[in-house]
Amino acid sequence: MAYVEFKAIAKSFGNFVAVADLDLEIEQGEFFSLLGPSGCGKSTTLRMLAGFVKPTKGHINVHGRDVTALPPEARDIGIVFQNYAIFPHMTVFDNIAFGLVERKLSRPEIKKKVDAALAEVGMTGFEDRYERELSGGQKQRVALARVLVIEPEILLLDEPLSALDKKMREEMKFWIKNIQKSVGITTIYVTHDQSEALTMSDRIAVMDQGRVLQVGSPVEIYEQPASRFIAEFIGESNLLKCQVTTLDGSACSVNLGDVSIPGRLSSNASVEPGQDVALLVRPEMIRLRPIEANEPPKLQGTVSETIYQGSVVRYRIHAAGQEIMVEVANRPDLPRLNTGDNVATYWSAESGVVIP
Amino acid sequence: MADGKMSQPRSLSQHQFKWLLVVPLVAFFVLFFVIPVGLLFATSFNPAKVGQVALVSDLTFDNYIRFFSRSNYLMAAGRSILLASIVSVITLIVAYPMAFVIAKTENPARNTFLLILVLASMQLDMVIRLYGMMVILGDNGLINQILQELGLTDGPVALMYNFRGVVFGLVQFAIPFMVLTLVGVIKGIPSSLEEAARSLGASRRRAFMRVTLPASMPGILSGSLLVFALSISSYIVPALMGGFRVGVLPIHIYQQVAESARFQFGATIAVILFLISAAAVAIYLRLGNRKSGGLA
């Protein structure tokens, strides 16, 4: 039995369906992300688990216990908010002690635990500060300490990095992941940022319009997206229009501008020969080479734009009536191409994913 | 660097233009508030002379000595402070729940309706509202009729022309100010604060007591300060609802100026009233800094 189970959960606000018939299972100790565009229902899902929103129908089980009807204070779930929700009238110490005071711990016990929590998040010495005297990253640390100190069963993180600047965000990504690993707490992370989800998660659920579209590891989600929406939402993608020619298990080949190209079928997808499909090729999976004489048939095209970005060079290739974006590492052993060059494109059969 | 130098002259003239915008208000304020009040305050240091209005060069502390050596004036000051304090507390208790409900009502139509309800009383002049209250609070008024009808009292209960009546009148007058101040502050408290408290183990009541209420302390302080200042300086309410029998400072000022024509002593009481209000502001600011982690 999974640690957290959403069973046929739905939530409507008036006529608006925020979450429709959602089933999810999250394992103990897992870092699980709900990823999707704003309004996809990920925050509502999180808030139902926290107990702030009552589901219209369905059940939520935690550790085998049905918590659907429990108020938030009876759920033993810690949450870190996007705005951190540091109590402005309390010092850092009193903020972190809040949950311990509610649990009626003795004064010395509280002091011991708060000190340990402060040390864990690297905020020793900040006990007497108020919220307005803290930077964004420090608020983040206090918010996390305040939750971890009560040792909840589940940690919920609601877009906790979106209020930070880019550099801080990169730093906190790894910091949060490390803390989560060392504490070993089951964590559910809500974000619209695919790079955060890919970096931090053990598994990701991609959501759109109140539904879960795909659940899988970051590698599965990135390399075998179940739909065009997921392929486009996560990472950058070339979705090339083509037709299926032959099919053999998950291996199949497609016809793209008179050239037959091998690919593999996306997970759980089913197609038939002759069907119009999309071939997903990530820009960094494609290699380019000037066309040589006696070339065996490959997808050929013309460089229509070159974009120099320092560590990588990006090329827009016009081929078979479509635009293909290619990203090449900026290395001396790779040929530098110019606008107007004719090129042949290559990618391994593994890197071409056929999506219905 | 070059950029900064280029834009400097323009930003300076924009700066000057901005100050130009406040000239009409400042001029009005100086002409009709600072100068008359300044003159009035200066008058308080002139010897009291019946019928004398103009400022003279003869300076004295006689008026202040008179104020502090007469028990009826000191009692009036105490009564004024007590009245304004009681009104502030009652108004806060009555207004907070309403302000809380309005702040938490997200439906814009319902929110506007509730605010209009609160502000409706401000559409009528104070005198008219007070005459309306008299109909209810008088010896033969609605409340006394009901009390006697129910057999709860034998004779009429004095609800008016006493301290109690002044409190009723001032609370009624102050409620919209308090509600408006509180709504703004309570609305500004993110709901995630209460949610964080709940998920940390606090019940709804505990979360309110430990987080929402303290977080609204800046509004509670500024709202009560506003109500205190409005109540202590009100003349019309003690005059009508107290029937001149509740001797607060504004009543004494009126009597000195309008009845005894002793401008200088009236001015002295006005200065003292002003100083009490200023002291209240100072105390509140201190309190605010301590109570709310410097939020006020």
Image (spheres, grey):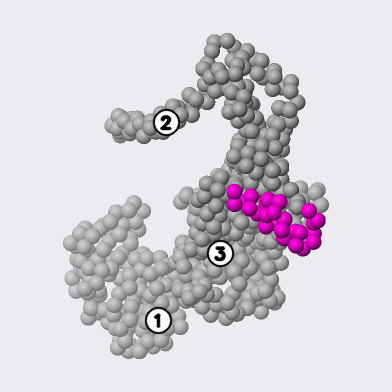
Q: Are marks 2 and 3 on the same chain?
A: no
Can residue A136 be spotted in the picture?
no
Name the mark on residue A265: 1
In this view, the residue in front, A245 or A104, is: A104
Q: What's under tag 1, amino acid-wise?
A: Leu
Eye-nearest disc, 2 or 1:
2
Q: What's under tag 3, amino acid-wise?
A: Tyr
Sequence-wise first label, 1 or 3: 3
Name the dominant secondary structure of the magenta segment.
helix
Q: Mark 1: few, some, or many residues within 10 Å (few <14, many ≥20)?
A: many
Q: Which image quadrant: the N terminus of chain A? A: bottom right
Q: Which residues are magenta?
A: B131-155
- Residue A57: which quarter of the image? bottom right
- Residue A147: which quarter of the image? bottom right
Looking at the image, which residue is at 45% across and 73% down? Answer: A209
Name the mark on residue A189: 3
Looking at the image, which residue is at 68% across and 51% down? Answer: B138
Cα distance between the residues tagged 1 and 3: 29 Å
Secondary structure of the residue carrying tag 2 is: helix
Location of residue B108 with respect to B15 vertically, above or below: below
| Magenta highlight on residue B154 | yes
Looking at the image, which residue is at 67% across and 65% down? Answer: A72
Chain under disc 2: B
